[in-house]
Amino acid sequence: MAKIRVTKIFHFEMAHALIDYKGLCKNIHGHSYQLEVCVSGNINQHTNPAQKGMVMDFSDLKNIVEKHIIKRYDHALILNKKTDPELLKLLKTNYKNIIVVDYQPTSEQLLVEFAKELKLHLPAYVKLHHIQLSETQSSFATWYAEDNE
């Protein structure tokens, strides 16, 4: 049995603001995010000969991540529900893709949400190994399954 990890990289644009933060990130600002999704599995579990030797078809992984993460968050503004209600109302009147969450929309918190969502939709024969979210070329957060079991 050969257990292998495979990773696919995705890019999306998203804005956020950190409520009550004492730095520049208290302001609405955006990032060009890079999301790396790594799954692991046995390369010999497939009964379909065309998929023998694969952990998971990269196109299947792409479809799952795009459907459940990228489509929702790309070009979205994500804000904490503690944001001024009048501001939220005004923003929602003028813009469509506003996501209000009950946490600080940090990379770390987003990874927790992304991991929950991905684990719900990945096939049973693979395991989410880790996901990494980069806000900039030098700043990223990583979620590992082994740290969260």
Image: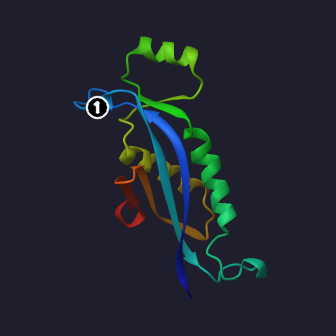
x then y, percent, for residue 72: 59, 39
Disc 1 secondary structure class:
helix
Residue in the image at 28% along x and 31% along y: 24
Q: Is residue 109 left or right of residue 54?
A: left
Direction left: furthest residue:
22
Compared to 56, does 1 lie above or below?
below
Q: Is residue 43 left or right of residue 34?
A: right
x then y, percent, for residue 29: 40, 32
Question: In which quadrant of the rendered image does the C terminus lie?
Answer: bottom left
Colour scheme used in the picture?
A: rainbow
Compared to 44, does 106 lie above or below?
above
Q: Nearer the viewer, residue 145 or 104?
A: 104
Q: Amino acid at mark 1?
A: Leu
Residue in the image at 36% along x and 41% along y: 106
Q: Is residue 48 visible?
A: no
x then y, percent, for residue 107: 39, 46
Compared to 59, does 125 lie above or below?
below
Q: Nearer the viewer, residue 120 or 52?
A: 52
Assess disc 1: are there few (<14), some (14-19) or many (≥20) residues with their C-alpha within 10 Å of its C-alpha.
few
Q: Is residue 116 visible?
A: yes
Image quarter for residue 6? bottom right
x then y, percent, for residue 60: 68, 62
Which residue position is annotated with label 1? 24
Residue in the image at 77% along x and 79% along y: 50
Total numbered labels placed on residues in the image: 1
Q: Nearer the viewer, residue 76 or 47?
A: 76
Residue in the image at 42% along x and 63% along y: 145
Direction bottom: furthest residue:
1
Direction front: furthest residue:
137
Question: In which quadrant of the rendered image does the N terminus lie?
Answer: bottom right
